Amino acid sequence: MNGEEIVELKNVTKYFEKGFIKKVRNYAVIDVSLKIRKGEIITLIGESSCGKTTLGRIVAGLIRPSKGKVLWFGKDLWRMSKREFNRYRPLIQVVHQDPYASLNPTRTIYQILSPIIKKYYKPKSKSDLLREVKNLLGYVGLTPPDYFLNKYPHHLSGGMKQRLAFARSLIPKPKLIVADEPVSMIDMSLRLSVLGLMKKLNEDLGIAFIYISHDIATARFFADKATLALMYLGRILEIGSMDEVIRTPMHPYLRAILSASPIPDPRIAKRRRKIELKSLEVPREVVQLKGCPFSPRCPYSEDVCFENTPSLKRCSGHEVACHLVDKLPEWVPPWQVMV
Ligand code: SF4
């Protein structure tokens, strides 16, 4: 085992079956392999229902994959003894999208945090416990801590609730936090501060993150060090260092997303080259496994795209799943267009 690897997914597929007489499989994740190493940030980007939340839950051990392997610290998660599982479980935490639903509304902040601190730190006295709770609140920016101790979750803004959720996840000293759309339900003005907190946890404590989002703009907050993985209908279509991928996006789907992103400078917006898709409809349920998942919408598709599923291959310093990647027309991201 490489000591740096926290989680490894090997050819993971997850499907859900429906129907009584004739069962139909809906695929949420298809043949995904991914490694998450110590201190790394992986941003998992994709539109709703592309499988990114299911993948995050598989990483966190909350869902068992239908096929493939999940390794935690080099060991097969679903073959671990209960003792091993209990040892590793606290090291991989999840922060959910909805801060309103993830905190018990009948408990004060002190009552939410103190039992977990008692369990993991075993403080010797009540004053030690209180000090630990205050330190934690101060660390995540809920200051002054005395003001927050006896507040209930409904007294907090969305951003503060997410800070509290991160504070709670920090207590077991995790190696990895799966943050599932942590800023999508909070005000635009507070998003940056929560993303900044994640960056601080990564830089100060070396915690690795899987940041799941449908919003490529917030993912770019981590551009200096993150890996970007683009998901579509259960598959990863492009993956590499975010800097690199954003500078030279190769997959037609990523190009289409970037070409449609709002641009504040009207001079640049006017000159950008939009990519017209064959269809704007995204299939909601994936039952068809043959061919490129983007082929019904891709403006460049050829026969091969409908017959064979492309696998990830190296191109322009990162990996892209497209049969025709070497034949695609040149395309310059809008922000690199000279005015
Ligand atoms: Fe488009 Fe074909 Fe590439 Fe798929 S494999 S993205 S359909 S060109």
Image: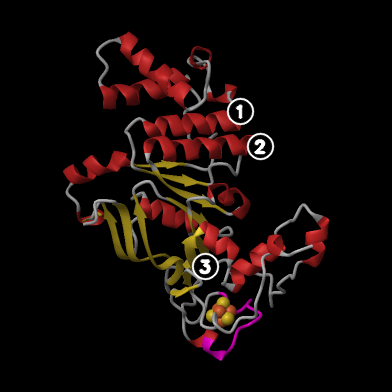
**Label 1 element class:** loop
Disc 2 within 8 angstroms of ligand 1 (CB):
no
Amino acid type at image mark 3: Leu
Give the number of the disc on residue 233.
3
For the residues labelled 3 and 1, the Cα–Cα distance comes to: 34 Å
Q: Earlier in the sequence, mark 3 or mark 1?
A: 1
Q: Nearer the viewer, residue 177 or 219?
A: 219
Q: Which residue is identified by label 2?
A: 187
Residues under labels 3 and 2: Cα distance?
28 Å
Q: Quadrant of the C terminus?
A: bottom right
Vertical relation: 294 (above or below) 265 = below
- Left or right: 326 in relation to 257: left
**Mark 3 against mark 2, which lies toward the viewer?**
2
Q: Is residue 216 above or below residue 336?
A: above
Please give the range of residues in magenta. Answer: 294-304
Residue drawn at point x = 51 percent, y = 31 percent: 163
Q: Position of residue 303 (x, y in %)?
A: 56, 90
Q: Looking at the rendered structure, which numbered label has been put on residue 157?
A: 1
Q: Which mark is residue 69?
A: none
Main secondary structure type of the part rendered in magenta: loop
Looking at the image, residue 302 sits to the left or right of residue 64; the answer is: right
Mark 1, residues whose alpha carbon is within 10 Å: few (<14), some, or many (≥20)? some
Considering every residue shown, the one lying at the far front of the view is: 338
Marks 2 and 1: CB-CB under 8 Å?
Answer: yes
